[in-house]
Amino acid sequence: MAENFGNIIVFGETGAGKSSIINMIAGHEVAHISSGATGCTFQHQAYELPVHDRNFTIYDTAGLNEGDRGTVNRAAAMAALYKLITGLDGGINLLVFCMRGPRIKKATHENWKVFHEIICKKEVPMVLVVTGLENEENMDEWWWTNRGTFEEQGIRPDATACITATRGRVLKDGSRAFDEQYEESRAKVMTTIVNNVLRHRHKFNKHHWLYDIIQGLLHFFGLIETCGAADIQRIVDTCGMSGEEARRFREEVANKQH
């Protein structure tokens, strides 16, 4: 069996193109894509895929910030991703944060802070993939024009890929409107993944001997729930969750721990 080089989690808002990126990497459709306003990925789905001849397990996740009308409400999506990141066997080698350009939303900063800073403690390499840029004259130029806005909000990815995740409409000659940009984008995404997994040898993995010892001591002295509650409260505050959303989030996290 071929060696697996690690776990990669793809996450972001509904409609950001997460499932499309999974299909782009695979070279064919493996993840269902929703054409509606709500997402179709429920919690998460794992795919073992080759990226430049190296196998990775890549996780497609539920869209964040769907609200109550989405397939998965925000509290449930946040809780599911929280538990996936903190409990994944083998740890995490890379986070791929997807957002749809060209507009930068308030939720972009919230989601970045929650997962990069609060949950992963800045220990996991995190790359930004910006989709929806097929109409830009130069997709890469979009990042250099907007980089300052991201940095002002504390968003400093290890790498950035500005892409299109669609081939576009069919033209008269049978080709697609954005075929060239799509192939360029596929190469960018795959190179970004491999480079950042191999460059950062460290991975976020709570399941090692030192962590188990510390957890045991915290549990013995009655401190473990307090430690977890602090992170959960920071997530609630960062996302500006309502009282009802916060209650749901805490319940979902507690339910997934059993």
Image: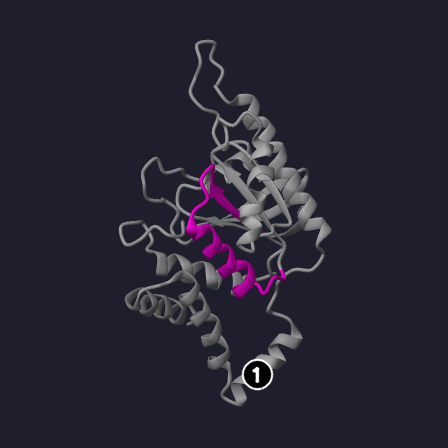
Packing grade of label 1 (10 A; few <14, some 14-19, many >=20) is some
Q: Quadrant of residue 237?
A: bottom left
- The answer to if 73 sits in the magenta stretch is no
Q: Nearer the viewer, residue 176 or 43?
A: 176
- Residue 248: x %, y % from top left: 32, 66
- The answer to if 117 sits in the magenta stretch is yes
Residue at 41% across, 62% down: 79
- Residue 65: x %, y % from top left: 37, 52
Q: Nearer the viewer, residue 230 or 3?
A: 230
Task: State whether residue 161 is above or below residue 202.
Answer: above
Which span of residues is magenta-colored?
95-123
Colouring: one colour
Q: Quadrant of residue 154?
A: bottom right
Q: Quadrant of residue 141?
A: top right
Residue at 37% across, 62% down: 240
Q: Nearer the viewer, residue 101 or 249?
A: 101
Residue sitting at the far bottom: 221
In this picture, residue 44 sits left or right of residue 196: left
In this picture, residue 96 sits left or right of residue 199: left
Residue type indicated by callout 1: Gly
In this picture, residue 96 sits left or right of residue 19: right
In this picture, residue 237 sits left or right of residue 126: left
Numbered marks: total: 1
The residue identified by callout 1 is 216
Give the position of the C terminus as an image quadrant: bottom left
- Residue 99: x %, y % from top left: 48, 44
**Secondary structure at numbered mark 1:** helix
- Residue 15: x %, y % from top left: 40, 41
Q: Nearer the viewer, residue 53 or 65?
A: 65
